[in-house]
Amino acid sequence: MKIRTRLSLVFSLITSSVFIVFGYTVYLFSENHRSEDFQDHLEKRVVVTEKIFLEKESFSANELEKITEQFLHTLPEETEEVVEIREGVELKFKYPYPEDLIENYETVGAIKYDFNNREGRCRVFNVKGRRYLIIVTAKDIVGLKNLLFLKQVILLLVAIGIPFIFLVSFVSTKRELLPLFEKIENANRIGAYNLHERLGVFNPNDEIGQMATAFNRLLDRLEAAFEAQKSFISNAAHEIKNPLTAIMGEAEVVLNKDRTSDDYIKSLKIVLLESERLDNTVNNLLQLSKVLTQDDDIRYDKLNLKDFVFDVKNSFDFINPGNEIIIDNPHNELMILGNKNLLKTVLINLFDNACKFSKNNIVKVSLIEKGEMNVFHIEDKGIGISNEDLDKITIPFYRGGNALAINGSGIGFSLISIIIKLHCGKIEIDSELGVGTKIKVYFKKESI
């Protein structure tokens, strides 16, 4: 069932229920008012009957005339009956009455009842030492007729009103949801070829406007991811193709004619260098893919930042024995929560970049405590990074203009950024061209 139909039915059901309850309430109050009003008339007739039949001798001629005139204004189909109550004598009545009245008249001063579509009122009177039971009955023809008319009007209004309410709610709902239908049609037309298109937002404060805004933001993220993917594939292909082209070209040159052993050695060194470059690119791609897909499976352990940094430094010494990394005054008790292998990748890349872009000059590393964070700080005196390149440094395969001549794949810093985010940390970079780069990596403190 469509939302439009469901909303129309729900609205119609609620409105119709309120309509029916309101009509039924009006009918009940009207019936109660009619019954009380008619009973009040019956009570007056009982009093008049008592005065006419039982106490007429005690009134003057004028009073009796007034009472008689009141008595003449009878109710529709009215009956009056006066029965003397005698000890041990069964009461005999001219008209039929409900059994409750006959059984309970002794214990109740006044009784009202509804019997055979007639309403009645009775009362016991004491006159000159004798007891009399007066019963007056009548039919409220006018009141019941008006009540019946009210009932018919309410039923007619309900019969007409419910379909009318459904029709109005259906049309109103369709009209209110029309912008949503239009947005659905527009969204269905957006594909890879026109991902730049967006849904129109006419009222950003209502629910449909908020939905359109959220959908447009989703399209922004998808478009950015789509463009990043195209750029990633293009750059990855370029980074892999260049070493392969160099290897194939060198092999063709060597195989073109006989060479000296020195020429073969030279060519093999070139092939080895390009192979290492290709291997480094592929490994970085594999690491990046692994980090992006294992977010839920990462295991975090408590790490002593000082011991961890020294372990990574020892490992890096095998990769780059000529490095000039100096760990300056490390803090002994800085504990963090992290994945050892992933954070090792971060530090290895930071060490490698610092040494590579400073041509193995001195690189200072320090560990400091700052508020609720523990900070890994690394500083080099290398070529630096421009402000324009800083904004794009986390894009895979992006390399600054001054770094193109230096061997690298452009994946390392994007990998660093992703791993730091996985550890709920942050990274700050302060760099100046020709002066050097300072990088601070913030980790949340962990208790010992």
Image (spheres, grey):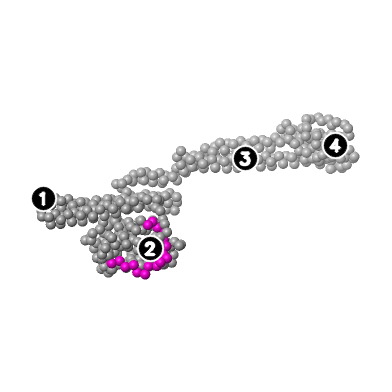
Q: Nearer the viewer, residue 183 or 288?
A: 288
The reply to whether the magenta stretch includes residue 286 is no
Secondary structure, mark 1, is helix
Between the C-alphas of marks 3 and 4, the distance is: 41 Å
Q: Is residue 206 visible?
A: yes
Q: Quadrant of the C terminus?
A: bottom left
Which residue is under mark 3? 24
What residue do we see at 88% from left, 42% from top? 58
Residue 186's spot in the image, x, y percent?
Answer: 36, 45
Residue 9 - label:
none
Name the residue that disc number 1 marks.
256
Residues rendered magenta in the picture: 324-340
Q: Of the residues shown, which amino acid type is indicated by label 3? A: Tyr
Q: Residues within 10 Å of mark 4 (few under 14, many from 20)?
A: some
In terms of secondary structure, where does tag 4 sit? strand
Does the CB distance between marks 1 and 2 fall below 8 Å? Answer: no
Q: Say few, some or many: other residues with alpha carbon within 10 Å of mark 1 (under 14 / 14 to 19 / 20 or more).
A: few
Nearer to us of marks 3 and 4 is 3
| Residue 434: % across, % down | 25, 68
| In the image, residue 275 above or below residue 42 | below
Q: Residues within 10 Å of mark 3 (few under 14, many from 20)?
A: some
* Nearer the camera: disc 1 or disc 3: 1
Q: Decide: is 342 above or below 158.
A: below
Going 46% across and 43% down the picture, which residue do you hit? 173
Which amino acid is tagged 1?
Answer: Asn
Q: Where residue 286 appears, x then y in whole percent?
A: 30, 51
Tell me the mark number nearer the camera, choosing from 4 and 1.
Answer: 1
Q: On the image, numbered disc 2 is attached to which residue?
A: 307
Q: In front here: 144 or 117?
A: 117
